[in-house]
Image: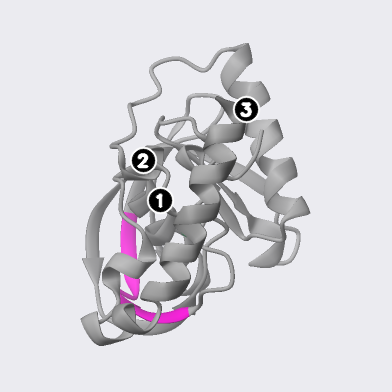
Amino acid sequence: MRVIKYGNPILRMKAKRVEKVDHRIRQLVNEMIEIMRDEEGIGLAAPQVAESISLLVVDHSLIEEDGEPSAYLNPEILAAEGESVFEEGCLSIPDVREDVKRPEVISVRYEDIDGNIHEKKVDGLLARVLQHEIDHLNGILFVDRISPVKKKMIQKKLKQIAAEEREAMAQVA
Ligand code: NI
């Protein structure tokens, strides 16, 4: 399993709902948590490991004390308010970091790995991470949310990442 990069068409697909948590899903969650930690990410969405399903993991140990990595299944943003600007990066777009404007507070509904449904209002870093990862489930990348001028400035870098990704995909095939 590897983190796929910008240019891979899977990153642009709309992820399918997880209907049932089986052994395969649990194993995927464990593998995603491992990759997230290895790559020092704070969040990782299943499409980034080429699984187009509505699942993401967040490393809460990087957000709050006593936090642990956890999985969010079929997450949905119910409401959003306020506005904040924060510099984002993405494991699928290495070496690119840009300011992104997003709502400051969101209400989110999701299922945990045991099938319990949660509805929460979150803000700060967790709201930021969840919005970034939920975007992945809808085929949206943070570079889609920056100004056209800034996007133009990183165009060369994006093309280079996409070219490397084409090579990586060809090697697997
Ligand atoms: Ni990302």
Judging from the image, the colouring scheme is one colour
Number of the front mark, 3 or 1: 1
CA separation in Å, label 2 and label 3: 20 Å
Q: Position of residue 45 (x, y in %)?
A: 49, 45
Q: Main secondary structure of the magenta part?
A: strand
Q: Say which mark, if any, is on residue 9.
A: 2
- Place residue 34 in its image quadrant: top right
Residue named by callout 1: 7
Q: Position of residue 61 (x, y in %)?
A: 72, 60
What are the residue bounds of the magenta stretch?
98-107
In the structure shown, which secondary structural element does the residue marked by tag 1 occupy? loop
CA separation in Å, label 1 and label 2: 6 Å
CA separation in Å, label 3 and label 1: 23 Å
Q: Is residue 108 above or below residue 129?
A: above
Label total for image: 3
The amino acid at mark 2 is Pro
Q: Is residue 82 magenta?
A: no
Instruction: Please state, as top left, top right, bottom left or bottom right, where the N terminus lies in the image.
Output: top right
In the structure shown, which secondary structural element does the residue marked by tag 3 occupy? helix
> Would residue 80 appear left or right of 100 to someone viewing this image?
left
The amino acid at mark 3 is Leu
Q: Earlier in the sequence, mark 2 or mark 3?
A: 2
